[in-house]
Amino acid sequence: MNLINEKENLVIVNPNAGRRKGIKDWDKISTLLNEAGIKFKAVFTRFPRHAINLTASHIELGYKNLIVVGGDGTMNEVINGIFSQSRYPTHEIILGMITVGTGNDWGRMFKIPKGYREAISTIKKNNVFIQDAGVVNYYHGENENSRYFVNIAGIGFDALVVSKTNKVKEAGRSGPLVYIKNILLSLIKYRHVRTSIKIDNIHIKNEIFNISIGICKYNGGGMIQLPDAIADDGLFDITIINKIKKYNVIFNLTRLYNGTITKLPMVETYKGKSIFIDSEPVIHLETDGESLGHSPFTFEIIPRSIKVLTG
């Protein structure tokens, strides 16, 4: 017999998000949730990927209303938990967020307020939007893996910067300035990679600097590499930065943040449902700020599959 009230929320808390703001501010957040009359059960992540298991197991118990207290990485794990359970169709799960991370790019797309009281008020308003999701198959050595995502996947230079930034986060330092610093440091060692890209029926071969594939607009703490992205159009937006001189990367850094990067002659944009990418040598991947594996990659869109609460 299922004793869970369908209106009870499962709150998934990442204690380490935002330089441990998840745990430092939890008393304040939980008090505000209680004051708002939101019935909830809180669970806390203890290690990487734990939110995937917590989410899936609690949905199997009957929870359909989820609130993420964390950043983009925590949201990504919760999304993967939603897709790994079998009790409900994914679009029947309702997902809200209280942002305590450092990048908060998914929250930026959906106008989730940074203030806790305001974020909780947004959840109470129950303004539902059904967004697309994506799934990517990638490799770790000889082993093929898959990962779902709801924001942006970065291939090439982005993946290197994210890898460096995540290592710095583990040491307790984070924020937009750290990300910019790692962009500059990564330029020293990064090399262009020859790729073969198929987007639906379009075939592209070129040396690339970076590829962004996504559903939403923002990554890297406010960069706008996919300025025309629409989160429920059933299509990936793709921005390919072809071979570029390193001084041009520095010179055009502001374009990454004001959405005009796509105006440069070495940048190409596309939309598509299915994408295949191979490369020589292998090229690396990140999704929603989480470092994953290497090429070859296959991406597929999953239209209107995640129900989210927006500002």
Image: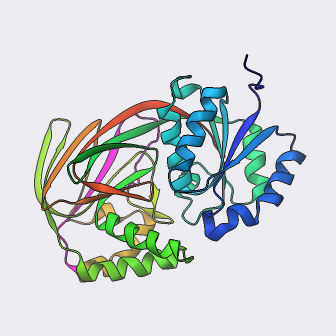
Prevalent SS, magenta region: loop
- Residues drawn in magenta: 226-246
In the image shown, does 148 or 270 lie closer to the viewer? 148
Q: Is residue 203 above or below residue 83?
A: below
Residue 23 in view (yes/no): yes
Instruction: Name the residue at 36% across, 40% down.
Output: 135
Q: Position of residue 162 (x, y in %)?
A: 40, 67
In the image shown, does 262 or 302 lie closer to the viewer? 302
Q: Position of residue 136 (x, y in %)?
A: 32, 43
In the image shown, does 71 or 264 lie closer to the viewer? 71
In the image shown, does 6 or 305 lie closer to the viewer? 6
Instruction: Name the residue at 33% across, 63% down.
Output: 159
Q: For the N terminus, give its image quadrant.
A: top right
Instruction: Name the residue at 48% across, 41% down.
Output: 80
Q: In the drawing, does residue 164 fall left or right of residue 308?
A: left
Q: In the drawing, does residue 59 fall left or right of residue 27?
A: left
Q: Is residue 264 above or below residue 231?
A: below
Give the quadrant of residue 294: bottom left
- Which residue is outermost to the top? 1
- Which residue is outermost to the right? 35
Q: In the drawing, does residue 262 fall left or right of residue 268?
A: right
Q: Position of residue 221 (x, y in %)?
A: 51, 66
Instruction: Name the residue at 57% across, 76% down.
Output: 172
Residue 303 falls inside the magenta stretch: no
Give the quadrant of residue 87: top right
Q: Position of residue 157 (x, y in %)?
A: 29, 67
Q: Is residue 96 above or below residue 288?
A: above
Residue 234 in view (yes/no): no
